[in-house]
């Protein structure tokens, strides 16, 4: 078997941990320590996060969508496919190198979604961006770390805390959606969503889409109209 080739490394701002980008043939992997955070052959559940949320938006043409976590661009690419020509998508990515990789080394992996004129990029903490807005987004999609039980950055836990969910509720327009991806189920998080005022749907999605793989968890939390 062909060995993995290390293409680049990047420091995570504020904590000093390192991300490493690897390639083996046409397969790419991003790791933190011994943990593989994402793989270009395993993105079915990331696609499903965007598809499930965007299909429920009342106005697909002019929706404003925030995506927390760029990764390899698959969630963004799926959202673009399910939204209209006048939609606005903002991607918040903490690690500048991940944005650079998506414009260069990883550009072809998800079909160059950053080149779409509907997309803008915020290089910074998605939590700070959420807290700065009020009744602004039609959907917020969080694909950060490995979900509510983060493995790589402790600060990510704040996104999924009661205070973080209340901030997301404030940033959303009436009738809009919060979508959350997780590597595994978490009954406690479902209850936190409900206590924050969301009507909750739980979905399981295959890691490799139609080709199977493990089942990952997706929550959709809907904000009421009033």
Image: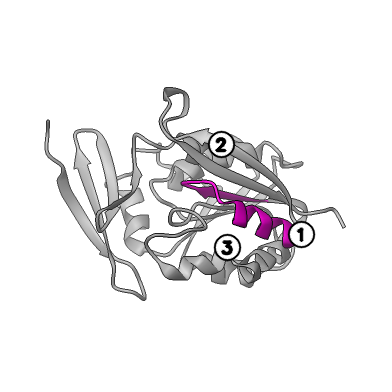
Q: Quadrant of the C terminus?
A: bottom right
Residue lying at the far bottom in this picture: please name it: 14
Image spot of residue 157 (x, y percent): 50, 66
Among all residues in the image, which is located at the extreme top? 210
Q: Position of residue 1 (x, y in %)?
A: 12, 30
Give me the C-alpha separation between circle 1 and circle 2.
22 Å
Colour logic: one colour
**Left or right of 82, for residue 61:** right
**Disc 2 vs disc 3: Cβ atoms closer than 8 Å?**
no
Q: Nearer the viewer, residue 143 or 121?
A: 143
The residue nearer to you, when weighing 161 against 129, is: 161
Magenta-tinted stretch: 178-196
Q: Circle 1 is placed at which residue position?
A: 197
The residue that label 3 is drawn on is: 160
Question: In the image, what residue occupies the spot 43% across and 69% down?
Answer: 154
- Find residue 108 and report its image quarter: top left
Asked if one can make out residue 124 in the rendered structure from this viewpoint, the answer is no
Where, by quadrant of the figure, is residue 80 drawn? top right
At 72% from the left edge and 68% from the top edge, which residue is drawn?
Answer: 134
Q: Give the secondary structure at mark 2.
A: strand
Q: Dot 1 surroundings within 10 Å: few (below 14), some, or many (20 or more)?
A: some
Query: Quick check: 9 above or below 87?
Result: below
**Labels 1 & 2 near each other (Cβ < 8 A):** no
Sequence-wise first label, 2 or 3: 3
The answer to whether residue 192 is magenta is: yes
**Element assignment for label 1:** loop
- Dot 2 corresponds to which residue? 204
Query: What whole-number distance in Å separates the C-alpha atoms at marks 2 and 3?
Result: 19 Å
Sooner in the amino-acid sequence: mark 3 or mark 1: 3
Q: How far apart in space, not on screen, are marks 3 and 1 (Cα)?
A: 14 Å
**Residue 63 seen from this side:** yes
Q: Please tell me how crowded label 3 is: few (under 14), some (14-19), or many (20+) other residues with Cα within 10 Å.
A: many
């Amino acid at each position: 078997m062909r060995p993995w080739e290390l293409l680049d490394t990047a420091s995570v701002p504020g904590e000093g941990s390192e991300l490493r980008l690897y390639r083996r043939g046409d397969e790419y992997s991003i790791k933190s320590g011994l943990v593989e955070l994402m793989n270009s052959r395993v993105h079915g559940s990331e696609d499903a996060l965007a598809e499930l949320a965007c299909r429920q938006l009342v106005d697909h043409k002019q929706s404003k969508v925030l995506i927390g976590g760029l990764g390899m661009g698959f969630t963004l690419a799926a959202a673009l496919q399910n939204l209209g020509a006048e939609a606005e998508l903002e991607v918040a990515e903490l690690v500048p190198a991940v944005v650079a990789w998506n414009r260069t080394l990883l550009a072809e992996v998800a079909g160059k979604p950053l080149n779409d004129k509907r997309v803008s990029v915020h290089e910074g903490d998605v939590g700070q961006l959420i807290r700065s807005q009020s009744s602004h987004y039609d959907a917020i999609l969080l694909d950060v770390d490995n979900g509510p039980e983060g493995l790589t950055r402790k600060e990510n836990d704040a996104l999924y805390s009661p205070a973080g969910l209340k901030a997301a509720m404030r940033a959303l327009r009436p009738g809009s959606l919060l979508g959350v991806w997780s590597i595994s189920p978490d009954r406690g998080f479902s209850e936190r969503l409900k206590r924050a005022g969301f009507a909750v749907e739980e979905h399981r999605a295959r890691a490799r889409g139609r080709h199977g793989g493990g089942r990952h968890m997706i929550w959709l939390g809907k904000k009421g109209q009033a």
